[in-house]
Structure formats: C-alpha cells, structure tokens
Amino acid sequence: MRLRQLKIRGLGSLPETDWIALSVTTTLLRFPDKSVGRQFLKAVQCINPPSDCRIDQPFKDLPLETVSASGYRRVIAPEKRTIVFGIFDTPSSLVRELGAITPPLYETDRVEVGRRLDYSRWINFVEIASSSRWSEVSEDIRNLLSHQSTEEDDASNIQRLLTETAPSERIKGAMLEQLATWLTGLQSRLPEPGGLDGILEKVLRANRFSEARAIMERRLPQFLTVRYGEELPRLPHRKVSDNDSRALPVILIDCFDAALPEETGAEIPEVLFNLAKHCQILCFAEHSFPGWNLERGQIVDVSVLN
C-alpha cells in the first residue's frame, strides 16, 4: 500500500490544505514556516503512528472552536472533526483478500483513512458504499413475507419495517440484526434456501465492511518520523510489489535543520535513494535541495487555505 494523497483540515496554527498528490517514492514538502511544517508532520504521522495517539496527544494544543472574521464563534465537536486525511492505493493481493469477504470489495482501488480530533480513526473504501439501502432489498423482503405466516413475532417486525422504513435508510445496527435473524430462519424452512444468499449478502453488507476495515487496520503502513542526519530505520531488502500486502513503513523525514541548498551534495543522499527503493519517503523542509534532482511532481509547495 502506498500513500497517494494527503489533506489536512487543521485548526489554529495547524493549516488547512487542498488534496496533495504524492510520489510513490520520494516527495519533498516545502513549507514557508518551520513550526507549521513540523505540526503538519505530526498530523500526518497520526494516520498510523507507531504509538498510541491518545497517549501522545499531538492535537492537544489545537483550539476547540473557530472564530469567523465577523467574530462568530463555533464550537468544534472533536468526535466529528477529521484533522488528517490520507488516500492509499491497494495491491492486487489485498483486493483479493477484501473481495473474499464480500464481492463488492473486488472493486476496491483506493482506501481513505482519517484521524479525528478525538484521535478516533475511520476507514472508507472510496466510491464503494459500506452498507445497503433499504430500497435495495425491500421488494425481495416483501415477496418473501407474502409467503410466510404474519402471526409470528419475527414476521410482524419485518412487516413493520416494510411500513415504516424510508427507501434511503441504510441497513445497519438493529435493523441489520433483525433482518439477518429472520432471513437465516427462513433458510431452514425454504425448499431452495440458496435463493436467499443474494439478499443476505446485501443485508449483511455493513458487517462485511466492518470485517474489511479490521483487515485494513492491520495492513496500513506505519508512519515513522526521523530527523535528517539521524540513523534511518533498517528495513528488509525487498521491494514492495503489487502482489505483496505486507506494507513497509512510510518514512517522514524532518529536514528543517538540514544544510542550506548550496551546502548539499551533488545528488540525493545515497541513504535516501536506497531507502526509496523499498518504501515511501516524505521529506519536510523550508527549502528545496537542488542537488537531489527530484522531478517537478516530487516537490510540493504546501499552500495554506486558512
């Protein structure tokens, strides 16, 4: 898995940005201010840090309210405010693993991960709905119910769902459990229960996606931070391939105190060059390093929106 895009929705001195496209090897992120850049680095690491965010509390200095130009104050709910967003690509081996859980996940090509101000994390499969709408199964449920006794408690509950549920409502929580229990019971009574498989798959979609998110939690690369000039992490001597779901870390390198451009070498340091063969590198700096000979797409001036 490789991080392809980043976005920060900061508060106070932590900036808000547009989506930032990243190289799969090395990206140099340039900031006009060192302190802002280091805040940005800490926020990015929160996508999947090596230690518990709730203990380290990198967002502890962020304000819990915003003030508009007219003086209007708005309180921020930490459990609703996402601070950092990241979009990852998905190797084919991971897609196969996800698709084995539920067929819609064979369409996975990108996964979005966010960390909220309260340090909770969410994971979404981009452009794939993680639960079914009631309208996707309501007619099938109605047809099944018409052939069952409505005197049973389960059947009367299902009848109430047909009467009261809006077509756009998502099937999850108590509704999901109720429908799944009823359909599973029908399987033991119908002469050809296989006809229920497709309906059950739609009903259980939210649960299947929860299973998939648990896999993603384990597959996300760790984000490791080092200062430029310090010893870099020792990594296995292998390249990440499309068929390898074991994610090597994303290395975040603080280059703010590195040598000025005229003092740098003639080429990107060998240690970074070799590291980029195995994993993804994000360098954070106030200036460029011309001698590194990075391509234009590998150098990003982080524009601040707020």
Image (cartoon, rainbow, N blue to C red):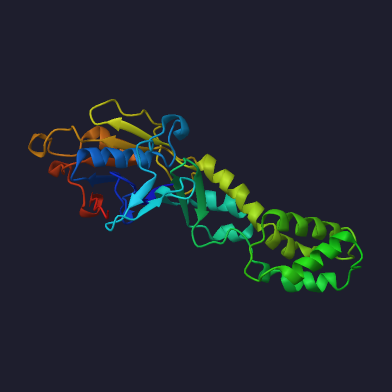
The total number of labels drawn is 0
Residue at 72 percent across and 58 percent down: it is 175
Residue 281 location, x and y as percent?
31, 41
- Residue pushed farthest front? 71
**Residue closer to the observer: 263 or 31:** 31
The answer to whether 119 is drawn above or below residue 187 in the figure is above
Residue 64 location, x and y as percent?
39, 44
Residue 9 location, x and y as percent?
36, 51
**Residue closer to the observer: 211 or 192:** 211
Residue at 38 percent across and 35 percent down: it is 58
Residue at 12 percent across and 35 percent down: it is 264
Residue at 81 percent across and 62 percent down: it is 157
Q: Quadrant of residue 168?
A: bottom right
**Residue closer to the observer: 75 or 213:** 75
Residue 77 location, x and y as percent?
46, 48
**Residue closer to the observer: 273 or 252:** 252
Residue 93 visible? no
- Residue pushed farthest top? 231
The answer to whether 300 is drawn above or below residue 44 in the figure is below
- Residue pushed farthest left? 262
The answer to whether 97 is drawn above or below residue 161 in the figure is above
Residue 57 visible? yes
The answer to whether 218 is drawn above or below residue 138 in the figure is above
Residue 207 left/right relative to 37: right
